Amino acid sequence: MEHLHSSELLKRAQYLVWIEAIFLAIVDIMAISGNISVCYAVYRNQRLRSLINMFIVALAVSDLLISVSCMPLSVATLFQRRWIFGTTVCQLQGFAMFTFSLASLNTMGLIAVSRYFCVVKPTKYIVLFRKQRILIYTAAVWCMALIGSVPPLIFQTGRYTFQPGKAMCMYPFQSNIAYTVSIECVFVAAPFTLITFCYAKVFYTVSRSNRVFTQENNPEQLRANVEEAKVTKTLALVMAGFSLCWLPISIMDYIDAARGEPTLPRKVYLTYGFLAYLSSAVNPFIYGATHRRFRQEYKTVLKKIGLIFTCGRFS
């Protein structure tokens, strides 16, 4: 099937080459500009320098690294109809994609846990989530991501390989079932379960508190509770966006692992690649749609870019 996908990649009609390459290039530009805007917004606006936004910046950094180090190689591959960068770069792209994706997912796990303690156990939140500790937690997540993604670099078989259907180098999940199962359980299933539990408890607690504060006619506490609910909804939407992109990918990986080889059509695997990259571009738009301060900072950035473009055009 891999040979068939290589042939299909090579023999595509010219209009498909342009459509696929340009679409992914647009996603790449969106991801780079959006995640840079998130980091710049937090840097520029002191009110955005909250503890929870430290996690958001960490998430933006991992997405930015994917868009800078991985996406351009796939855009060039779609345009050139084949992998042109050699074995070493292939290993680096597969390793980078795996590492940054695991870091993103586990950072979202950290965000969910922080929301849980902030809303459900606020007295413990003050102790557990200080600036220095958040930096330690983030470093630990990245170390875990590295531990998870290093083994394919040293496997005799099952190393990161170019997968023409996806237009990227990835770990072939069907090559080592024991490793695949451990990755899926420890780095995927466990964080998803933890995130689901944390957000369920948070929304239940917020809903119950709203009823209590309404009955007690305590508008100040009610406003504070509503604000926490807004923040949590934004972060839950981020997780939902990530899930919508990566759950279909996980299903495809399970199918390949069960069948022992890639057996799905190239269009399905192409969707796999686009979804993997799209997950790195959606978060800044979610922040802009749901968070007023981020939206204001985005407008400021766009105005500056427009001013620079206008000055350069007429200079």
Image (cartoon, grey):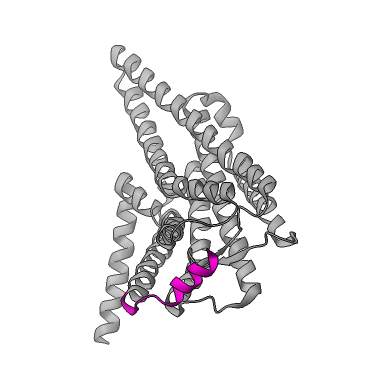
As drawn, the residue found furthest toward the bottom would be 315
Is residue 152 found left or right of 259 in the rendered image? right
The answer to whether residue 300 is above or below residue 288 is: below
Compared with 215, 259 (above or below) is below
| Position in image of residue 230 (x %, y %) | 35, 35
- Residue pictured at 32% horizontal, 51% vertical: 288
State the image coordinates of residue 141 (x, y, percent, origin top left): 62, 46
Residue 315, position as x, y percentages in the image? 27, 87
Residue extent of the magenta highlight: 1-15
State the residue in front, 164 or 313: 164
Q: Is residue 231 visible?
A: yes
The prevailing secondary structure element of the residues shown in magenta is helix
Write the residue at 25% across / 78% down.
Answer: 310
Quarter where residue 221 is shown: top left
Is residue 12 in the magenta section?
yes
Q: Nearer the viewer, residue 243 or 105?
A: 243
Front residue of 266 and 213: 266
Vertical arrangement, residue 162 with respect to residue 206, above or below: below
Work out whether residue 75 can be spotted: no
Place of residue 110 in the rendered image (x, y in percent of width and height, measured from the top left) = 55, 40
Question: In the figure, 133 relative to 301: above or below?
Answer: above
Count the labels in the image: 0
173 relative to 230 in the view: left or right: right
Instruction: Identify which residue, 281 or 311, lies in the foreground.
Output: 281
Q: Is residue 302 magenta?
A: no
The quadrant holding residue 39 is: bottom left
Q: Residue at point 61% right, 53% down?
A: 174
Q: Is residue 157 left or right of residue 210?
A: right
